[in-house]
Image (tube, coloured by chain):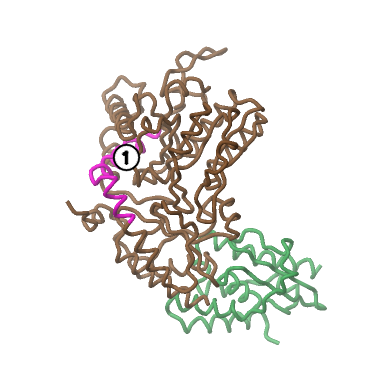
Amino acid sequence: MATIKERQDVLVEEFEFFDEWMDKYNHIIEMGKSLDALPEEKKNDDLLVQGCQSKVWLHAEKNGENVRFQADADAIIAKGIVAMLIDVFDNQPAKEVAAADLRFLEEIGLKDHLSPTRANGLMSMIKQMKFYALAFAG
Amino acid sequence: MSYDVQSIRQQFPILNQQIHGRPLVYLDNAATAQKPMAVIDAISDYYMNYNANVHRGVHTLSQRATDAMEAVREDVRVHINAAETAEIIFTRGITDSINTIAFGMGALVGKEQNIVITAVEHHSNIVPWQMLCQRTGAELRHLPMNQHGEVVLDGIEDIIDEHTALVAFNHISNALGTINPVEAILERAQKVGAWTLVDGAQSGPHAKVDVRAWDVDFFTLSSHKMYGPTGLGVLYGKREKLEALPPYQGGGEMIATVTLEESTYAGLPHKFEAGTPHIEGIIGFGAALKYINEIGIEAIAAHEKELLEYATQECSKIEGFRVIGDAKNKASVLSFIVDGTHPYDLGVLLDQQGVAVRTGQHCTQPIMDAFCIDGTARASFAMYNTKEEIDLFKAALEKAVTMLR
């Protein structure tokens, strides 16, 4: 199974195909569209990630040493971004998720590209995922 | 003389730039308008040639700064046709203006009384009244709106009654662009002897207001929405009303005498202007007013009306495009959603194509709740926008919608 580092490398390679940000967004949107939706009954307010401009629901559960993530969002770009994070983190060892360095965000250029409020939203998603991982690892 | 939008655009240097490699199309004017050279020059001139604190100094620069600032007060009086210059108060903005009244009225309103707003208010004309009602026990009421985003006047006699202390409402809604039936609401309020406040945040740049023709007690304007600097608002109040209100903030400039035990307050307008005023802002606002009046507010409004109609007509060709707030009487705001897309996503993808719009709730959560939506995207037009820009906006919107569906 691919490690967190290997999964990030794949994402970075995918984005290298695109020069224009409109195309990168298109790719993020496609990732959002292909992420399985959370069933409506799971979209409760407890799962909302605080600090996002749009609604992002994040669900995590323990799978042995690993952590499984599911997520959804009402806006598709936010959903695409959380899909990328799930791509990297889902079913990885909780300890490694908690300690992971997400350099792909810089390498894709997403971190610099987002407006400060959206970048805060992205940071909140990552923080929430790591928070779950830390709880499961301990 | 025909309306020369190209020569107007030349006065706004910020418009001449690329965003993400595309020409900037700035359609977020209801949030803040861009500034013409006349305003930028006036601010530079102040700092380069006569920066000094006002009112206190005997030296020449202070006198010049004071004269310039006070000349703007007189310009504002003329602009809204107030009876006297002392009735023009400079504030930090509309929010500050409304809070000034809401604070002062705390001393005058009893728990058997009520305050009336409408269902199409900005949070800044809701929350201060909720706070006032919490302090005094008074009741907060509102005139409802219909599915077009228009204020409904049926039942106004029951809502605005003899216990109404104040009726406060906006001239034009920032979220929907609805022009409210000001005269009809004022007439009812005046009949029962209620005080009245009209929030001119959105009407300032689009409509000429005569406060004496309305016979309104308070009226507010926002400089930055009228092509002037940020951080400055105007509060107009009838002398007898302003004199009846206690001051909002204490400090320098607003006093007549001070001992360590007690102070007496200065007369109008200084009683409501504690601290050093926003001198540069006031001088810049004076230049903005002059600029608006040179072009003519009626000419600007006619130009914007044409843009609004054109944008509404063109964008309605996009499948699933829905205007939020289709009042008969509208100004300069196109609030919309597109089925199957989220406003935030539209905002991001429009920005990528150089188009600046506002997305979200526009500080009007109750309006969004009434329409059962989380928010809208909002394009709003100003004197310098063009039909070509609307074509670019529509094309960008179509592209965004195609990507998102």
**How far across and down, in percent of the image, does residue B34 sit?**
35, 51
Vertical position of residue B260 compared to residue B36: above or below? above
Which three-letter amino acid code belongs to the residue tagged 1? Gly
Q: State the SS at label 1.
A: helix
Camera-side residue: B384 or B311?
B311
In the rendered image, what is the letter of the chain coloured green? A
Q: Nearer the viewer, residue B185 or B299?
A: B185
Q: Which chain is brown?
A: B
Q: Nearer the viewer, residue B26 or B52?
A: B26
Left of A9 or right of it: where is A44? right
**Among all residues in the image, which is located at the extreme bottom?**
A1
- Quarter-wise, where is residue A3 in the image? bottom right
> Which quadrant of the structure image shows residue B270?
top left
Q: How far across and how far down the image is residue B276, in percent?
A: 42, 29
State how many labels appear. Answer: 1
Residue B124 sits above or below residue B55 on the image? below
Residue corresponding to mark 1: B284
Percent x, y of residue A32: 59, 76
Is B136 left, or right, of B382 in this rendering?
right
Is B301 a magenta residue?
yes
